[in-house]
Image: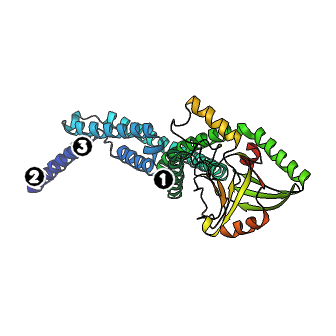
């Protein structure tokens, strides 16, 4: 009897345990699936997209992926506040899966865009460098406005910063610097090119003056000087043949012919050496005074004054010389032509008083200048 009672107790215990196990299994089988795995996958995908700089190269896609992830988290938290059997994580899972897909696509597109931007930036920087080479060759010595010169220097600085950013992989900042460099260099180039275009409208006159001077040298078996402003040279011809060339420095505002005293322009036209000076006669070591102003200069001065193109109280000026004290590497005179002292020594001995001096803008065409 005792054995029989123990058996039933044991049976009841086993039954209760079985019922509890079945109940527990049934309870948990009704619990909704949690979005842990999907949210973790979305988090990993977002981290990969961020590492690929999707937030920079495809910001809209990255923002959408982030918003979907936030919605997944928000819905997960909302469902967790409900009674366990009333929870439904389907929306949270859907948001997380959508976030993962969007983040994965954003990463792929960011990598592609970054590569394209990188390649394009290199091409643009190379283009700007070539533009700077042209400016340095053809425009840098032009007497452009100080504002334009500063703009050009700012463009060069922006390009230098762009190269540093490019080397460090910061292509977004690089792109910004490249845009600034392009804008500044374009502005400076357009301004300088406009000046050059206007200046070279006189090229046919320069050719005429040059030919007349060389023909004079040939027919009179004499020495003449040709001052070429663009190349900054003084050329010595004898019997029409080039014998020597010297570097020169001109007036600060040398482009265009001289109009009045104080405009800091070097005159253009035909002149002669009136007087040779040395020692205490000049403060520039040695000097050769030109017969400026010529009759053509006086006529131009009067015409421009009547038009109101020069100050009312301005005078035409004088004392234009070829003198020493040069070799500074910049245009610095008030209108004279400066040579280094050792060069003026040579030239001083080669040319007598009365030597023709023709001053022109350029011996080569504008196209030849730009292609040099």
Badge 1: few (under 14), some or many (20 or more) residues near its Cα, within 10 Å?
A: some
**Which residue is depicted at the point 51% across and 35% down?**
312
Q: Secondary structure at mark 2?
A: helix
Q: Looking at the picture, how far across and down is residue 52, in whole percent?
A: 47, 50
Disc on res. 63 = none
How far apart marks 3 and 1 lie (CA) works out to 61 Å
Q: Secondary structure at mark 1?
A: loop
Frontmost residue, 124 versus 53: 124
**Which residue is depicted at the point 73% across and 62% down?**
246
119 relative position to 349: left or right: left
Dot 1 corresponds to which residue?
A: 170
| Among numbered discs 1 and 2, the one appearing first in the sequence | 2
Residue mark closest to the camera, 1 vs 2: 1
Q: Looking at the picture, how far across and down is residue 131, in whole percent?
A: 63, 48
Q: Looking at the picture, how far across and down is residue 127, in whole percent?
A: 63, 47
What is the quadrant of residue 38 in the picture? top left
Residue mark closest to the camera, 3 vs 1: 1
Dot 3 corresponds to which residue?
A: 22
| Among numbered discs 3 and 1, the one appearing first in the sequence | 3
């Amino acid at each position: 009897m005792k054995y029989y009672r123990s058996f039933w107790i044991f049976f009841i215990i086993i039954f209760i345990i079985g019922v509890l196990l079945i109940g527990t299994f049934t309870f948990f089988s009704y619990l909704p699936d949690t979005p842990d795995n999907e949210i973790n996958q979305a988090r990993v995908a977002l981290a990969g997209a961020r590492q690929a700089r999707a937030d920079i190269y495809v910001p809209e896609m990255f923002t959408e992926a982030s918003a979907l992830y936030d919605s997944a988290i928000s819905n997960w938290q909302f469902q967790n506040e409900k009674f366990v059997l009333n929870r439904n994580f389907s929306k949270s899972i859907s948001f997380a899966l959508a976030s993962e897909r969007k983040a994965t696509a954003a990463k792929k597109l960011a990598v592609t865009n970054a590569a394209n931007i990188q390649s394009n930036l290199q091409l643009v920087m190379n283009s700007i460098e070539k533009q700077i080479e042209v400016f340095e060759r053809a425009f840098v010595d032009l007497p452009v406005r100080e504002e334009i010169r500063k703009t050009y220097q700012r463009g060069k600085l922006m390009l230098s910063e762009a190269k540093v950013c490019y080397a460090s992989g910061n292509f977004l900042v690089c792109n910004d610097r490249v845009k600034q460099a392009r804008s500044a260099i374009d502005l400076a180039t357009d301004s300088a090119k406009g000046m050059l275009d206007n200046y070279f409208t006189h090229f046919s006159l320069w050719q005429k003056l040059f030919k007349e001077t060389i023909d004079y040298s040939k027919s009179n078996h004499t020495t003449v000087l040709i001052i070429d402003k663009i190349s900054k040279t003084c050329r010595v011809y004898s019997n029409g043949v080039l014998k020597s060339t010297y570097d020169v420095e001109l007036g600060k505002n040398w482009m265009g012919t001289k109009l009045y005293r104080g405009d800091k322009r070097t005159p253009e036209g035909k002149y002669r050496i009136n007087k040779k000076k040395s020692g205490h006669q000049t403060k520039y070591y040695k000097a050769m005074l030109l017969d400026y102003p010529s009759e053509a200069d006086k006529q131009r001065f009067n015409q421009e004054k009547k038009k109101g193109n020069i100050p009312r109280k301005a005078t035409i000026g004088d004392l234009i010389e070829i003198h020493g004290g040069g070799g500074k590497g910049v245009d610095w005179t008030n209108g004279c032509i400066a040579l280094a002292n050792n060069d003026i020594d040579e030239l001083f001995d080669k040319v007598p008083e009365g030597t023709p001096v023709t001053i022109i803008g350029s011996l080569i065409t504008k196209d030849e200048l730009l292609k040099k």
